[in-house]
Amino acid sequence: GQVERLLRENRLTAQQAAAVDLRALERFLHSPLAEEIRSAQYVLREYRFTLLMDARDYAPEAAGEDHILLQGVVDCAIMDSDGITVLDFKTDRVTDETVRESAEKYRPQIEAYAHALSKIYEQKVKKKYLYYFRLDDDNNLYLSKPELLGILTRNIHNKNLPFFSSSNFLQ
């Protein structure tokens, strides 16, 4: 398959190829999120940016003339006429008990990416996703809410996973 081809082409090392979780990758490729990416008008992948930002956006106590240089790499962004969807993929192993803490840890990162893309493209960010490839052993998860980052559990194999409402999480 693809992993073997990338290995033959020296685009992956043997160690990297061995680390690929093919089941998790297959689950993702069959997910509604992957379908959204495939059907998008335009997709940014591994988008590197550097942007001079008002320091008060990140440190309210900063002086008005202070600026910071914000640099990052957005894993994926879906660009549509009605707005931008920011995606950040995570390989952390999380459980139902640790996913909230993990999502909160990544909140500043995805918020910074959303802010930067909104400024660069002069378009609103309509959704932000964290996609976890490893929730327990057989599950996958993505987080979403327009305007705010909330949590939504999706699982192709187990429809009985808990469903968390954005109204009481990460607001």
Image: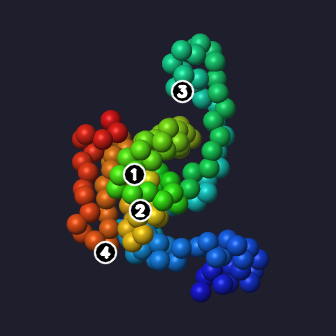
Q: Earlier in the sequence, mark 4 or mark 1?
A: 1
Question: Callout 1: helix, strand or loop?
Answer: helix
**Disc 1 marks which amino acid?**
Val
Question: Callout 3: helix, strand or loop?
Answer: loop
**The quarter of the displayed image where residue 148 is located:** top left
Tag 3 and tag 2, C-beta contact below 8 Å: no
Gap in Å between the C-alphas at discs 4 and 1?
A: 19 Å
Tag 2 and tag 1, C-beta contact below 8 Å: yes
Mark 4 surroundings: few (<14), some (14-19) or many (≥20) residues within 10 A:
few
Of circles 3 and 4, which is in front? 4
Mark 2 surroundings: few (<14), some (14-19) or many (≥20) residues within 10 A:
many
**The quarter of the displayed image where residue 29 is located:** bottom left
Residue located farthest toward the right when viewing the structure as drawn:
10
Q: Could you tell me which residue is drawn at 32 percent across and 72 percent down?
A: 156
| Nearer to us in this view, 125 or 90 | 90
**Disc 4 marks which amino acid?**
His
Q: Could you tell me which residue is drawn at 44 percent across and 53 percent down?
A: 130
Residue annotated with mark 3: 58
Q: Earlier in the sequence, mark 2 or mark 4?
A: 2
Residue annotated with mark 4: 157
Seen in the picture, residue 83 relative to 13 is either above or below; the reply is above
Residue annotated with mark 1: 99
Seen in the picture, residue 8 relative to 32 is either above or below; the reply is below
Q: Earlier in the sequence, mark 2 or mark 1?
A: 1
Tag 2 and tag 4, C-beta contact below 8 Å: no
Gap in Å between the C-alphas at discs 2 and 1?
A: 8 Å
**Disc 2 marks which amino acid?**
Leu
Residue annotated with mark 2: 135
Question: Callout 4: helix, strand or loop?
Answer: loop
Residue 58 image point, x, y percent:
54, 27
Q: Earlier in the sequence, mark 3 or mark 2?
A: 3
